Amino acid sequence: MCGILALFGLPNAENVRKQAVDAAKLLRHRGPDWSGIYCEESTIIAHERLAIVDPDSGDQPLFNKAKDLVLGVNGEIYNYEELQDGLHERAPGKHTFLTKSDCEVLLHLYAEDGIDFLTKNHVCGMFAFAIWDKRSNSYVVARDTVGIIPLYIGWGSDGSVRVSSELKALHKFCERYEEFPPGHILDSKTGQRRLFYTPRWYEPSPMPTEEIALVTLREAFEAAVISHMMSDVPYGVLLSGGLDSSLVASIMSRNCQRRHGSAEPAAWPQLHSFSIGLEGSPDLKAAREVAKYLGTVHHEYVFTVQEGLDALPDVIYHLETFDVTTCRAATPMYLMARRIRASGVKMVLSGEGADEIFGGYLYFHKAPNPEEFHAENVRKIKQLHLYDCLRANKAMMAWGVEARVPFLDRRFMEIAMGFDPTQKMCRDKDGKPRCEKWILRKAFDVPGSRAYLPKEVLWRQKEQFSDGVGYSWIDSIKAHAETLISDQQLATAEHRFPVKTPRTKEAYMIRQHFAQHFGENTAAAGTVGWQDSIACSSEVALKWDASFQGRADASGRSVAGVHESAYNADYKTASQASGATGNDSEPAAKKSKTA
């Protein structure tokens, strides 16, 4: 994982070199290990490296042997050896690899297959990259299908096109910039951006109808986790004690004794796990139990509410969002990342994506039918780049720690989104209630010595990260905002912030911090995900149940009758985007405005 900044179409690259170096420094937290830059004629590619694979020779930008192709990339290609072998079979002796970097294969695939190389080849990984082709005086920019890796594109007043891992490297130099869309490739020859790969789950219809065997699902996820353990440096796992992170930790603990794809012993043959929470939080207790069961070297970090509040402005700067849910959850993650980096670990695996794929959020209990359940899965996956993927990537990379997400592995997702959603629903075929993510839990519910997790962990109710670190964290942020933001400020918020107006004092406080870094109504606001939501739902799912109206808060406790510690019946809050409170004449989801 790294930070990239590429500038194309410059009148004179050398004249802009210092500006580019200064802008790249704003990304150095993403890659504190080394800096590299290509600067020639009309093009600059700057790179800030976090060395995970091939730390000795994988510095970027990367070149082919003729040095007429230049690559700057942020990401990991998990099947790079398979892709290299395929190239050597197709074109024996043609491609000379100059490093052991997993990302260099992208350069050679482009050289072999041209602009369609991501369509013609099954590239498994998370990535955002820019390729400069001196031969044709053209460039290519692309981002992975889910948007695990962030990427932004902007346009300079000198006519240049600029792409960056984070918008902070564009904000001061481009009047107009936007998020580069996930799953797209930009070809400068045509100026067109298009999807390079359309997965089977990309549209909700037709809904899959084939049932899946438990062993198929289990083995597919095991393979995804193992592939993500590729590393030449010490790594660990983020462990909340919930189902998703615990399954990742369990599989890792069974496969960590040897280096990935090698018989050599691992740098740390005993898995290290990391958790964070307020004193006495549900996550700390649960993670401790899982770590003991798995035999990990466990690192438990306790933070205080005041430490979280002190960090919040910095968190918002690194996240580049004012979405309330994301900022709540990212703050403890940001604090934990700093402690992880201090331990010597540079890469961790995490459980993001499972709730979107399997319907793990508590509001999924109200899904009216399999069709709606599956459509919401699709909607949530397509929004990950605005929320959970953004949080996991930027909160961890603020301290130079790479977070990998095996649930979002390309091959696993084709399987996990390719079977009948009836098997995922929170009611069985007879209509009897069952635990969320039932099919995933059941797949790993094996007996005796083969057990992956204790039963009480495997079947523990979903707890969102911002709740699990301690319920008083969310309550304290709200209380803090009450002391900072006046009723008058909130009443006139639409005049100060006409773009994505904050509707609660907490949202106003967060937006105010964002504005201090990126301006009040600049292009930065346009990149932020903003919608009405209950317990992390999409806007559409708010229509599922009348009880959702007026309770549209991100916390899982807002789902009455499902969460074991739900807010009482009198709880009301304004919806994030529309401001609806449940007393309106029509549902908030119908009136909200989302970019």
Image (tube, rainbow, N blue to C red):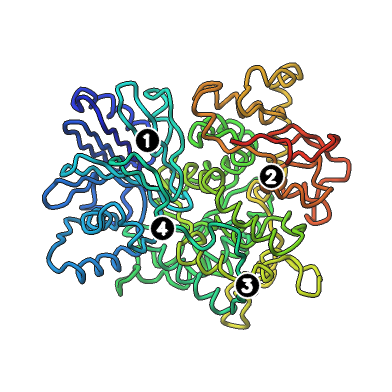
Q: Are marks 2 and 4 in contact (CB under 8 Å)?
A: no
From the image, tell me which residue sits under label 1: 27
Q: Position of residue 430 (x, y in %)?
A: 80, 75
Name the amino acid, label 2.
Answer: Glu
Q: Residues within 10 Å of mark 1 (few under 14, many from 20)?
A: many
* Foreground residue among 269 and 83: 83
* Foreground residue among 167 and 449: 167
From the image, tell me which residue sits under label 2: 539
Q: Secondary structure at mark 2?
A: loop
Q: Residues within 10 Å of mark 2 (few under 14, many from 20)?
A: many
Residue 336 visible to the viewer = no
Residue 548 visible to the viewer = yes
Name the amino acid, label 1.
Answer: Leu
* Foreground residue among 443 and 335: 443
Name the amino acid, label 3.
Answer: Thr
Separation of disc 1 and disc 3 at Cα?
45 Å
Name the amino acid, label 4.
Answer: Tyr
Q: Are marks 2 and 3 in contact (CB under 8 Å)?
A: no
Nearest-to-viewer mark from 2 and 4: 2
From the image, tell me which residue sits under label 3: 209
Nearest-to-viewer mark from 4 and 1: 1
Q: In the image, is 412 to the left or to the right of 493?
A: left
Nearest-to-viewer mark from 1 and 2: 2
Q: Position of residue 353 (x, y in %)?
A: 56, 56
Q: Position of residue 114 (x, y in %)?
A: 25, 54
Nearest-to-viewer mark from 2 and 3: 3
